[in-house]
Image (tube, rainbow, N blue to C red):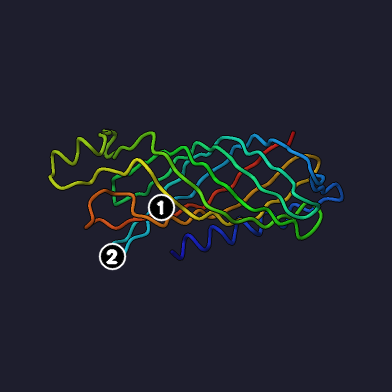
C-alpha cells in the first residue's frame, strides 16, 4: 500500500507541474472524445501479510465526455489495461477491458477532479516464471484449488486531469472492491495507479 500511495503522489505532482496559459475546459453542452495511452503501476491488495511487488503495464483506449454545464461533466470510457503483480520470481498478468464512468468536476481552468465506478472485463490472465507462461486455469488444475481469475471486476476510480491545447494529462487510482479470484480463500483486489496522455477532439 505504501508503494501505491507513493505512486499516486508522484502522479499528482506530475500533473500539477504541467502548467500552461493555454489551459482550457470543454464548453457546456459539448461532447468530446479523447484517445489515451499510458502506463500502469499495478498490484494486488489482500487481507493477508504476503508481500507482493508492483507490476508495470500499459493502458490504451478512449473516453467520451459530456459537459452538463461549465463545471461538471460525465465521462465514459473503454480502456485496455495490463494489470497484476509480482510474487518473487513469478509475474501474474491479468489484462482487462475497463469501462470507467466518472463525474468530472472542473475546479480551475483545465483542471478536473474525477471519481466514479469502473467495470472490468477480463480478456487474458497468465503466470510467467523463468520465461515460461501458463494460464491460471491450467495452473489450478495442476496444483489444485481454484486460483482462476473472475471474468468480471469492479473498482472505484478517483483521479485528476489537466488539459492544455487539447492535450490531456490524466492520473488516477483504481481501487478494486471485489477479489479477483474465484476461490473464497484467496482474497486479492486490484490496485492500480494509471498515468495517461490523450488528445481531446
Question: Which residue is identified by label 2?
Answer: 48
Relative to 156, 141 lies left or right: left
Residue 30 percent location from the top left of the image: 78, 40
Q: Position of residue 139 (x, y in %)?
A: 19, 39
| Nearest to N terminus: mark 2 or mark 1 | 2
In this rendered view, identify the residue nearer to me: 79 or 129. 79
User: For the residues marked 2 and 1, what is the alpha-carbon distance in whole angstroms?
Assistant: 14 Å
Residue 165 at what x, y percent from top left? Answer: 81, 40
**Relative to residue 132, is residue 113 depicted above or below?**
below
Label 2: which secondary element: loop
Residue 91's spot in the image, x, y percent? 33, 44
What residue do we see at 55% from left, 45% from top?
A: 100
Residue at horizontal 64 percent and vertical 48 percent from the top: 170
Q: From this view, report whether residue 16 is shown above or below residue 58.
A: below
On-image quarter of the N terminus: bottom left
Q: Is residue 115 left or right of residue 95?
A: right
Res 178 → quadrant: bottom left
Q: Quadrant of the C terminus?
A: top right
The residue carrying pointer 2 sits among few (fewer than 14), some (14 to 19) or many (20 or more) residues within 10 Å by Cα, namely few
Q: Which residue is mark 1?
A: 190
Numbered disc total? 2
Q: Say which of 1 and 156 sits in front.
A: 156
Residue at 29% from the left image edge and 45% from the top image edge: 90
Query: Which secondary structure, mark 1?
Result: strand
Amino acid at each position: 500500500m505504501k508503494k501505491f500511495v507513493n505512486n499516486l503522489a508522484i502522479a499528482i505532482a506530475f500533473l500539477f507541474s504541467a502548467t500552461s496559459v493555454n489551459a482550457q475546459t470543454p464548453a457546456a453542452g459539448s461532447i468530446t472524445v479523447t484517445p489515451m495511452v499510458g502506463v500502469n503501476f499495478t498490484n494486488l491488495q489482500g487481507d493477508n501479510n504476503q508481500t507482493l511487488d508492483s507490476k508495470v503495464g500499459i493502458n490504451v483506449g478512449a473516453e467520451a465526455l459530456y459537459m452538463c454545464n461549465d463545471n461538471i461533466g460525465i465521462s465514459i470510457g473503454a480502456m485496455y489495461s495490463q494489470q497484476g503483480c509480482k510474487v518473487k520470481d513469478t509475474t501474474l498478468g491479468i489484462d482487462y477491458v475497463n469501462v470507467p464512468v466518472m463525474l468530472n468536476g472542473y475546479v480551475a481552468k483545465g483542471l478536473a477532479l474525477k471519481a466514479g465506478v469502473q467495470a472490468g472485463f477480463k480478456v487474458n490472465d497468465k503466470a510467467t516464471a523463468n520465461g515460461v507462461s501458463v494460464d491460471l486455469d491450467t495452473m489450478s488444475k495442476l496444483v489444485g484449488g481454484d486460483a482462476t481469475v473472475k471474468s468480471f471486476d469492479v473498482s472505484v476510480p478517483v483521479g485528476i486531469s489537466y488539459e492544455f491545447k487539447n492535450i490531456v494529462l490524466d492520473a488516477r487510482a483504481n481501487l478494486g472492491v471485489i477479489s479477483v479470484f474465484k476461490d473464497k480463500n484467496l482474497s486479492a483486489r486490484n490496485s492500480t495507479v494509471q498515468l495517461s496522455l490523450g488528445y481531446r477532439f
